[in-house]
Amino acid sequence: MGHQMPRPVRPRSGRVEGDHDIARRRFLRVQAPVQRTRINHTIRISPIRLIDAEGQQVGVVDTPDAMRMAQDAGLDLVEINPETRPPICKIMDYGKYKYELSKRDTKQTNKSNEIKEIRLGRSVKIGVHDVQIRVDQARRFLIAGHKVQLTQRFRGREMMHKELGLERLYQICEDLGDVAKVEMAPRWLGRQASIVLAPDKAKVEAFKREKAKDEEDLEKLEAEVAAQNAAIAEAEGDDDDDDAPSQIKQQPPAKKGRKDNTSKKDDRIVDPVQDEIADLLGEV
C-alpha cells in the first residue's frame, strides 16, 4: 500500500483551499472584543454600588431602583467600574462623560507627541553659561516626558566650520545621557542643524529616585543643622547669664562743704608768686 497524499480541505463555498489560503488564515489577526460602557438598561447585574450625581456614596441598591433614581434626576445610570462585585455605577450625564473622556485622551496623546524646541542662540558664538541654561531646560522637559529638539544656527562664515556646532550638539547629548536617548541624528535645514532627544523611561525613573533620595538627605541635613544651631544658641544664653555683672553698691553722696581742689588736676603753669598771694588772701 503506497503513501497517500492528504486530501485538500474543501470549504463550504465549494472552492478547494490552497497553500495561500492556509497561510492567510494562519496569520489572520484576531481582534479582541470591544469593551463598551454599560448604561441604563444594559446593566444586567443587580444589586450595584451606587454613587449619586453629587458624588456621594448611596450604598448597595437594586439596579431597577437605581435606574428609577437616574430617570427622576433626568440623568443616566453609568457603570464606571465593572470589575468589582457589586459593580460601581454612578448617576451622571453620559454624553458629557464621554466628551470629557475623549478630551482627556486627546490631551494626553498630544502631550506625549509634543516636541519642545530649544535654540542655541543665533550663532555658534554662545557662552558656556547660556549653553548650560539650555541644557537644564532640556532636562526638565525630558523628565516631564516631552521630546526635545535642539537647534544650532550658523551665521555668515560659520558655515565653513560646521564641526563646531555639531560638536556642541553631541556634547549636549552626552550631558543629557542620564535621562535621554538620541531619537534623530543631526539633520540640516538651511543654515541650522537640529537633533531630537527622547526621554529614556528607565533612566528618568532612576534619576527621579536619586533626586528624591537627595531631597530626603537634604531635609535630614537641614534638621540636623537646625538642632545644632538651637543647641549652640541655648549654650550662648547660659554663658550670658553667668557673665552678667553683679549689682554695684551705691556710694553715699559726698558731703557739701569746701571744694577739694586738690582732687582736680590743674594743668596750668605753676607760678610761685601767685601761690603765695593766694595763700595770704586765704584762697587756698
Image: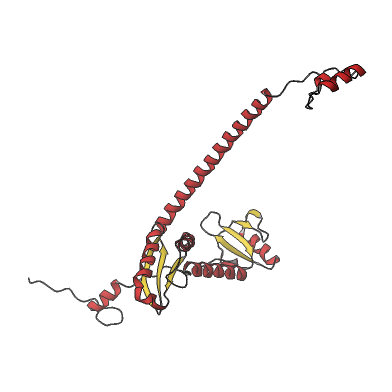
Quadrant location of residue 271?
top right
Camera-side residue: 22 or 280?
280
Whether residue 131 appears in this view of the structure is: yes
Identify the residue shown where x is 58% and y is 66%.
39
Q: How is the image coloured?
A: secondary structure
The x and y percentages for residue 281 are 92, 18
Position of 269 with respect to 195 (left or right) is: right
Quadrant, the N terminus: bottom left
Position of 262 with respect to 165 (left or right) is: right
Name the residue at the front extreme.
273
Quadrant location of residue 55?
bottom right
Is residue 150 positioned above or below 227 on the image? below
Camera-side residue: 107 or 187?
187
Camera-side residue: 257 or 269?
269
Identify the residue shown where x is 37% and y is 76%.
159
The x and y percentages for residue 63 are 61, 60
Is residue 265 positioned above or below 192 on the image? above
Quadrant, the C terminus: top right
The x and y percentages for residue 130 are 48, 63
Whether residue 253 appears in this view of the structure is: no
| Count of numbered circles in the view | 0
Is residue 42 positioned above or below 17 on the image? above
The x and y percentages for residue 202 are 40, 56
Identify the residue shown where x is 68% and y is 25%.
241
Identify the residue shown where x is 43% and y is 71%.
151
Name the residue at the left extreme.
1
